[in-house]
Image (cartoon, grey):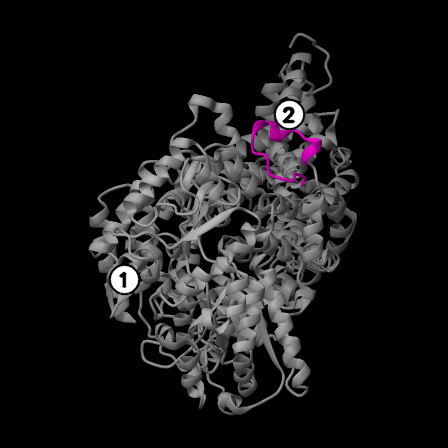
Amino acid sequence: MQRRTRIAATASAAAVLLALTACGGGDAANEDASTARGDITIWYSNNEFEIEWAKAMVEAWNAENADEQIKGQEIPAGKTSEEVIGAAITAGTAPCLVFNTAPSAVGQFQKQGGLVDLASFEDGTSYIEERSGDSAEQYQAPEGGYFQMPWKANPVMIFYNKDMFAQAGLDPENPALSTFDDFLATSRTLSAAGVAPFAINPSTDSQFFQVGFDFLPTFAAESGGMGLVEDGKAVFADEEGITVANFWKTLYDEGLAGREAVQGDAFADGVAAMSIVGPWAVSVYGDMNWGSVPVPTSSGIAPEETYTFSDAKNVGLYTACKNQATAWDVLKFATSEEQDGQLLELTGQMPLRTNLPDTYPDYFEANPAYTQFGDQASRMVEVPPGSNTVEIMQIVRDTYSKAVISGEGDLEEQFKAAAEKVDALAEEG
Amino acid sequence: MSSETVGRSTGVVTPGGAAGQGSRKRPVLQRIFGKNPLGVLLSTPYLIFLAVVFAYPLIFAVYMSLHDYFFSAPGAVVERPFVGLDNYVAALTDPAVLRSFLNVGVFLIINVPLTVVLSIVLATALDRVIHFRTFLRVSFYVPYVTASVAVVAVWLFMFSGSGLVNTVLGPLAPDPSWLINPLLAMPTIALFVTWKQLGFFILLYLAALQNVPKELYESASADGAGAIRSFFSVTVPGVRPATVLVLILATITGANLFTEPYLLTGGGGPNGASTSPVFIMYQQGIEQGKPGFAAAIGVVLVIVVLIIALLQNRFAGGKED
Amino acid sequence: MSTKRRVPGELTRGQAALRGTVLALGALLFLFPFYYMVIGSFQTTPDTSIAGIFPNPSNITGANYVAINERINLFTGLVNSGIFAGAVVVGTILFGMVTGYALAVLKWRGRGTTFAIVLLVQVVPFQLLMIPLYVMIARDYGLGDTHAGMILPFLINSTAVVIFRQYFLQIPKEMFDAARIDGASELRVLRQVAIPLVKPALVTVILISFIGPWNEFLWPFLITKDSSLQPLAVSLANYMTTIASSTTNPFGSMLAGAVVLAAPIVLLFIWFQRYFVSTDIGSGVKG
């Protein structure tokens, strides 16, 4: 009896070990995948405008390439898409291309061995750098190579409700929102006039990515184009960072911004007179009477010099893909000037390509509201690169939630402590 | 007197008949598998199922917790060194993790007693009610049968600063409001979960009540016991096995708390006052790519809950064999 | 106390009235959020004032539901949910019952260990197992994008095993002994004595094992990429978390999604309620 149990235990342990090694073990079939052609599967976001674009793109490609058909599927753009992709990488079931790979997840996917280095294609680097110009650099892996194709951005700006501004006796065409002092004064006026419960209401969620919709864009603007981490050092607790954090803290302390989560969209529902988002929101705000301005800075940096956060979504080519040569061609097709124009037309999101306003003059003429975004798209910062991106952003978010949104404890001290933690992580890569 | 009767009916009468009979028929099988070899046969499908879908991931999780692990694509050559108990040390010295265990402690202290008391009382009342029977029962089950995603939206609205609850409370409304108040966020979640899960536990008790022999109530009544007294002397001891079940399941539900801090308090806010160990596992393991650390938290959580469940079984359950 | 010759266990008139009031109030408290959900799902623009609690004819619309219907194939979703949940219910009842019986009534070697394992299974959070499980089912078993892969991890519900065990424990042992003395085999004891007696447990187990897969979002979401295989909960949760926010009335759309998800199971429950819960079972035990 005793012995039998032990044998059984050993046998099952061996089975587990086998399974474990299988999990990390190598099949070298990917060798020829990089030159193979044939049918591929792609995933795209489930936002209705992007679906429209993606379906048209797939149709256009399939009509021309009978031997290399694309099968397109939706994946959600929301909170859970990164874990789905992560799991699919591990199981080897990832598709060829995912049109909506968050830059914050790229470092991890790369570490998992899930992404193909696009620079390994002959024309990879040149194609990316020609299309996106200088901004391509931000999407390069720390050790070189491109594990993502910079695709589209939603440069974050301040939207304001012109009707509410007029109601509060403010100039709806030239609102005073460029310096922190102006912004605060305007917010106080809005609040005193009682046109909306809050002047502005960024999400108070503790999710890591919320960093991109309050602190990061204003910090990028204030610092003249710095991200949270520069050259492997946390810079968000420097003087500019503290100034920006104190600006937001004042908004919360004075009740000009809400500390509580709002269901739905605060701006669209008239809960806040301003919001801080990218151009994707234009379609949501539809027939509202809104205007937009760049994010504020302490000294009121001119709009044409103001930086912001990109909120970019990119395209990844995954190692599980059997026909990578086709996938690369599709990727180039989908980011061609024509397809980028379609994307802009249908979704209002900014393709990460140089000189947008001149490339698509007709569009910006017909949609003057987007001109600012098109221009802003040349001055954007990205999330820190590397496999610890999410952890870094979570640390910043947690610190910000506590010191700024809740206004607890000494702000500067907490930011410095967070910067120290981030330094250690950034060093790890 | 009445509890004595119950003790007899659920008690230890068995050893005689069945066992003696069987041992004469199939001595070999019985020597290997015990008095009723059929038990092995009946449990086999379940055990195979567990081996197929459960054992491997669990052992794998323990393996991960002992390594600097991360998930990788098939074929990728990566290094995942053995780190011993490093992940456990890191997890147990991380203030955020400790906070999350404390939060769940607060949750359990509120949720478990509330659940047990409310569900047994409501089940007893529902059991006897004659009018609007279906309507009443269904009302209590509805929150349980509905997905969390669906009901969270309504709760958010009711418990927000300008929401219905605060409007009704007027000057008594807490400031900061429920879900953003560090002291009230966890109790509000505990309340939400009690509301959400109560139907399930009522259901368990209702079914258990059907097995409390009616004679016990009759004899209690003959002894002059009123409704309240017979509730304590007949009903409560009569559904004792169900109570153990409710205790254990409520504890497990609490320990696996995830959806509520994720959706209701916007990711464990305010400032970590409503995080839970499972939420941190999700953050660390899935979002931040450190499954080894997450697995260590998971293993610790499993051990703690098992200990609690065993204690509950020991103290509330009495003997079973 | 005052009325000496009451039916056993019956309450005094005052107590009964109190009980009725408490139950009614409790029911209202439990139902209100749902009522509010339904009202909100029919509003053209969200009305968050107290007046918004009552239906307002000028603010009623079915547009939120139309929007869902346009975006999601409700029928395929329902069929997939039905297959998923139905298979789980059958597996759970069949295997859960026999395992629960074995654990409660029969004596066999390994029984204690097995029960400890059943408890352990429930204690382990799904988030811990999710990715290894996914890798195993999608890669090793090759069941990605199939109903089987969706069903497999839920096929037997361990909570159901515990519940069955607990109910079998509550049946007085004398009843089994009586059957055994009559010469019934253990299998017949199970079929003819034990199963009829745990009918009240059946409704509970059917319900819990149905609700789990019906509302389960994460697992089917991971395992199926093909939208024609996705259950309703996946498409609706998706709709609620990502798509609803870009509709003209996000709040209304979300609530409408919630109603569509909740309605089938509530209706089903009302239907079950009629067939299964019967107070006569108590007298059967005495039998």
Badge 1: chain ID: A
Residue sitting nearer the eye, B258 or A101: A101
- Tell me where the magenta segment starts and ends, as one range: C42-59
Q: Do callouts 2 and 1 mark residues in contact (Cβ within 8 Å)? A: no
Left or right? Give the position of B103 relative to A341.
left
Quarter where residue B9 is shown:
top right
Report the Cα–Cα distance between label 2 and label 1.
64 Å
Judged by its main secondary structure, the magenta piece is loop
In the image, residue C43 lies in the stretch drawn in magenta: yes
Name the secondary structure under disc 2.
helix
The correct choice, above or below, for C52 with respect to B83 in the image is above
Quick one: quadrant of the N terminus of chain B? Answer: top right
Percent across and percent down for residue C22 are: 62, 22
Quarter where residue C268 is shown:
top right
Question: Residue at (58%, 19%) from the top-left corner?
Answer: B229
Percent across and percent down for residue B139 are: 67, 34
Circle on res. C23: 2
Question: Residue at (57%, 27%) from the top-left corner?
Answer: C50
Residue sitting nearer the eye, B60 or A152: A152
Percent across and percent down for residue B44 are: 63, 63
The amino acid sitting under disc 2 is Leu
Circle on res. C81: none
The correct choice, above or below, for A167 with respect to A240 in the image is above
Within 10 Å of disc 1 (Cα), the crowding (few <14, some 14-19, many 20+) is: some
The correct choice, above or below, for A20 with respect to A199 in the image is below
Badge 2: chain ID: C
